[in-house]
Amino acid sequence: MNAPFYKFNFFNDEVSLIIAFVIGIGFGFFLERAGFGSARKLAAQFYFRDMSVLKVMFSAIVTAMIGLFYLNWIGFIDLSLVYKGDTYLLPQIAGGMLLGIGFVVGGYCPGTSCVAVSTGRIDGIIYLVGVIAGIFFFGEIFPLLSGFFYSTNMGEITLPQLINLPYGLIVFLVVLMAISAFAGAEWAEKKFRNKKT
């Protein structure tokens, strides 16, 4: 039996939406339990006082990456069937910077703002209202931005394809990067934890 199961018609669109909903609820629950429904905790990473977000998210990325690599290696999952959206280099860099600025100013990303709303935080509600307003505003001005939005299309490309290195080597390098980031995060927390902003 191979994965991804959806591509092999083990379940239909309706079941996939139910599965996505359950996974989303579980993800939100664990984010809240980790304290990621608090803007103070989330924003502290930008001041190097609490690097929990980097540690948790980087751990999740590395775990998923290693898991997918070995599941593909043993033939359980076909990575060529895993959906990858096109890379639009400049628009996605601009979008990432805009999201980062919003994260620093508001203390939430869109996902963590939903977690904050689920626990009744007023700042999370205001942030989510801003996200929704931004979506509608972007939809209204999209015709003016569509040229930029679809520019620098690189297609469905992965990092190993881009730099022409084996997947296994990329996995190894990202693991080394994660270990270095964790060590750097520990150092930063010790240095900045008690400093005033």
Image (cartoon, helix red, strand yellow):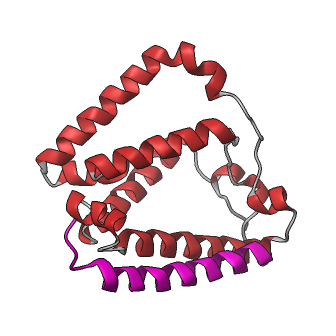
Give coordinates of residue 61: x percent, y percent. 55, 69
Is 52 situated left or right of 15 in this image? left
Residue at 76%, 45% in the rendered image: 156
Residue at 70%, 78% in the rendered image: 173
| Magenta stretch in the rendered image | 168-197
Please indicate, yes or no, whether residue 91 appears anywhere in the rendered image: yes
Give coordinates of residue 85: x percent, y percent. 67, 43
When the figure is inspected, residue 45 is found, relative to residue 149, above or below; the finding is below
Is 185 situated left or right of 150 in this image? left
Indicate whether residue 83 is drawn in magenta.
Answer: no
Q: Main secondary structure of the magenta part?
A: helix
Give coordinates of residue 50: x percent, y percent. 30, 74
Please indicate, yes or no, whether residue 75 appears anywhere in the rendered image: no
Indicate whether residue 179 is drawn in magenta.
Answer: yes
For residue 153, which quarter of the picture?
top right
Residue toward you, 68 or 34? 34
| Residue positioned most to the front | 196
- Quadrant (top left, top right, bottom left, bottom right) of the N terminus: bottom right
Residue toward you, 111 or 50? 50
Residue toward you, 25 or 146? 146
Residue at 65%, 38% in the rendered image: 90
| Residue positioned most to the right | 164
- Quadrant (top left, top right, bottom left, bottom right) of the C terminus: bottom left
Give coordinates of residue 164: x percent, y percent. 87, 63
Residue at 35%, 74% in the rendered image: 52
Residue toward you, 197 or 75? 197
When the figure is inspected, residue 14 is found, relative to residue 76, above or below; the finding is above
